[in-house]
Image: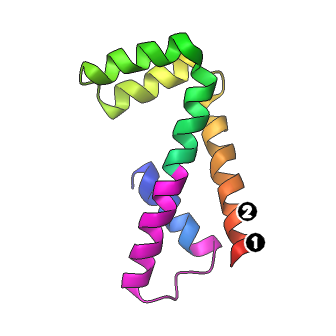
């Protein structure tokens, strides 16, 4: 199971949404995943700084794969994976308050 699928499964379980009809689950997952990915992206760009963002732009223009980009983030941002987990945890806590 890839990381995104695992995150989605965890969101459904922790937010108590796994009992909803499948179409509602899918709809909510799409929306939550979009918001979560935007937050991770914004946090990542902020931590990269101006020079890192220029390097990122060059990589994306050059057709870098998701794996290459993730490795780039890991080399440029100390504790990148911890940062991503923190964003995910904050999002889950925020969603729990809304439900």
Q: Viewed as shown, does residue 69 lie left or right of 44? A: left
The quadrant in which residue 17 appears is bottom right
Q: Which mark is residue 12?
A: none
| Front in this rendered view, residue 64 or 42 | 42
Q: Are marks 2 and 1 in contact (CB under 8 Å)?
A: yes
Q: What range of the chain is rendered magenta?
A: 13-36
> What is the x, y in percent for residue 62?
25, 18
Is 19 in the magenta? yes
> What is the x, y in percent for residue 58?
34, 15
State the residue at coordinates (32%, 24%): 60
> What is the x, y in percent for residue 90?
71, 53
Q: Is residue 47 above or below residue 18?
A: above
State the residue at coordinates (53%, 17%): 75
The residue carrying mark 1 is 97
Which quadrant is the C terminus positioned in? bottom right
In the image, farthest residue toward the top: 51
State the residue at coordinates (46%, 65%): 31
The quadrant in which residue 42 appears is top right
| Front in this rendered view, residue 10 or 38 | 38
Q: CA distance from mark 2 to mark 1?
A: 6 Å
> What is the x, y in percent for residue 94?
72, 63
The residue carrying mark 2 is 93
Q: Is residue 11 above or below residue 50?
A: below
State the residue at coordinates (38%, 84%): 22
| Front in this rendered view, residue 9 or 87 | 87
């Amino acid at each position: 199971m890839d990381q995104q699928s695992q995150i989605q499964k965890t969101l459904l379980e922790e937010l108590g949404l796994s009992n909803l009809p499948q179409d509602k689950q899918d709809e909510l997952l799409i929306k939550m995943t979009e918001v979560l990915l935007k937050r991770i992206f914004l946090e990542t760009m902020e931590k990269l700084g101006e020079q890192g963002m220029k390097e990122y732009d060059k990589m994306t223009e050059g057709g870098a794969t998701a794996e290459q980009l993730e490795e780039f983030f890991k080399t440029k941002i100390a504790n990148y994976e911890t940062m991503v987990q923190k964003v995910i945890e904050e999002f889950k806590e925020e969603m729990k308050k809304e439900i």
